[in-house]
Amino acid sequence: MLFKKTIFPHLVCIVLSALLVYLLGYPLRVDRILLTYFSLIFFAHFTPGKFIFGFLFILAAIYFPTSYYYGSPNVAVISALLETNLDESSEYFSQLPPLLLVAPIFLILVFIFTFTKLQFPKINNKYFILFALAVCLYKPVKILCKSNANLPPTFVIDNFKYPFFEFFTDLYTSIKIYTTEKQEQLEQIKYANTIPINSVSPKHKTYVIMIGESVRKDYMSAYGFKYDNTPFANHNASLIWDGLIAPAPNTQSSIPHFISQSVFIDDKKVTTQINNNIISIANAAGFETYWLSNQGRLGKMEITVPRIAAYSKHSFYTKKGEYNGKNSRGKHDTLLLPELDTILSTEQTRPRLIVMHLIGSHPHFCKRLEFDVQFNLNNKNISCYVSSIKETDDLIKATIESLQKHHEDYALVYFSDHGLAHTDNYQDLRHNASYQNSYQVPLIFFDSNRTQQQRINRTISGFQFVYLLSHWLGIELDVKHDYMQNELMDISEQNDIKIKDWQSNELYQFDNLKKDPNPY
C-alpha cells in the first residue's frame, strides 16, 4: 500500500521527467530531470496543473519525430516549419520510420491516461522545497562564481535548465533570429554586386556550375568508393579535387556561403553578403546568366538560395511554388536537360553562366531515382543513395554531351552542398552537424580543352568559394584571397578550417568534429 500511494507516484514523475527531456531534444542532465520532477510533484496534484502539464507533455510527444532527427528548437527547424507546404509535410512524414509515426500516438494516449488517472504526490515539506530551489539556482550560481566577466542580463534565464522553459525560449529566439536574418536578406537583394571587378577574360564561351545535393565524397568511386557509381567522372574529369569542406551541413546554410561572399566577425561568426554572389558578379562582368533548378521555388516564403537565384537574367524551375512534395514526384534532375538544350540552341555573343541546382541525393533516396536501383549493398536506403549518385554522374555526362552537340567551348564544375552522416545503425543517412563527413564533399571540374586528368589532394574551405568560381570564370575581382590570386593548381592547403552548423552563424573547428566512416 505504501508503495502504491507514496513511492510509485514519485517513480512515475521521475520517469516522466526523463522522458520529457528526451522528447524535446535536450541532453539528459540531472538538473533538467530534477526541475521537471519538482514541478510535477509541486503542481500536478492541482486540477489546473494536471491540465497544463498534460497539454505540454502531449506537445512534447508531437514534437518528438522532429527532435529525434533535428534536436531542440533551432533556426533550421523554424525555417523548415515556416517554409514548408502541405506537400512537403506529407513527404517529410513519409520518410519517418513507422515507429516514429506510431510513438507520438502511443505517448499521447499514455499521457492522457497518466494525467487523468494518476494521483500525483503532494509536497509540503519546507526543506524539500528549499532543496528544489537550490537545484534551480545551482547552475547559474556556479557559473557566476567562476566568471570574472560582465555577464549579460539574460544570464540566469540562459542557464535555467527547465525543459519547458528552454523549449519555448528556444522557439522564440529561433523565430526572432529567422525573421531578422530574412529581413536582412530581403534588404540585401535590393542591391547589386559591390565587389570591384578589375578585368574580365573568360577562356570559354559557356560555363556550367552544377550544384549537387547531399553527396559525401566517400560514396563516390571518383574518391575511392568500391562501387563504380561515377564512371563518367572517373574517366572524363579534367580535375578531381579531394579536400573541399562545405561551409555548413544543410542546403540553406551551405550554398549561400559557397556562392556568395562570406563576412567574418572576429573570426567567431560568419554571415553572407548575398548581393555579392556568383550570379551578380557574372552579371556585372557582362555574362548572360541562367539558373535552372530542380529544387523548387517557395513563392512568398522563398529561402536564401532562390533569392540568390533571382539575380539571374533567366530562371527555370521544374517545380513552381513548392519544393519537394508529392506534386513533384516524377520530376527528376533530367528535366533540366531540355531547358539546357534550349539555351544552348540560342545564339549568344556574350559568355554564358548556367547554374544547375539538382535535387540529387536528397533524402528520401529511393524517391530520387528515375531508374531502377543499380547497386545492391544489402540495404535498401544505402543502395538507393549509391544509385542516386550514379544518376547524377549520368546527368553530368548528358549535360556535357549537350554542350558538345552544340559545339560549345565549355567548362563545368560539380560540387555538392553538403554531405550526410549515418543513422539507424548504418541503415540510413541524414543531416547531422556533428560529423566531419557531413562537410566533406566532391569538387570535380570538366573542360572542353582537357588533355590529361589531374588530381589534387588538398584541404580547402567552402567559405569565399565565390572567389574561386569568379577566377574560374575569368573574372578578376579586387580582393586579396588565395582563391583569387592563384590558379587552381597553385591553391595551397588550408589549415585551421572552420565550419558553421545549421543553428547559428557561429564558427566551429572542423577538426574537432567526430568521424563517421563509410562501412560499405
Image (cartoon, helix red, strand yellow):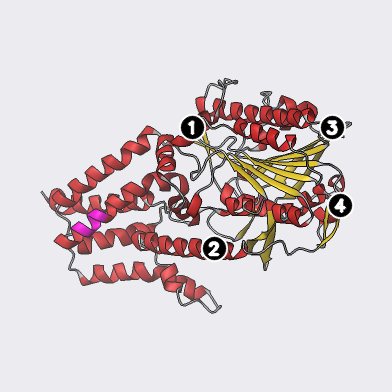
Identity of the residue drawn at 43% across and 51% down: 81
Quarter holding residue 223: top right
- Marker disc for residue 453: 3
The amino acid type, in three-letter code, at marker 1 is Arg
Q: Nearer the viewer, mark 2 or mark 4?
A: 2
Q: Locate residue 126: give its quadrant.
A: bottom left
Kindly identify the amino acid type of the residue bearing the numbered disc 3: Gln
Structural distance between the alpha carbons of marks 3 and 1: 37 Å
Residue 486's disc is 4
Position in image of residue 109 (x %, y %): 22, 43
Q: Give the residues in magenta.
A: 51-55
Residue at image coords 58%, 35%: 361
Tag 2: residue type? Glu
Label 4 residue SS:
loop
Residue 250 in view, yes or no: no
C-alpha distance separating marks 4 and 3: 19 Å
Q: Nearer the viewer, residue 150 or 310?
A: 310
Residue at image point 66% right, 23% down = 227
- State the predominant SS element of the stretch in magenta: helix
Alpha carbons under labels 4 and 1: distance apart: 43 Å
Looking at marks 2 and 3 on the same chain, the residue that comes earlier in the sequence is marked by 2
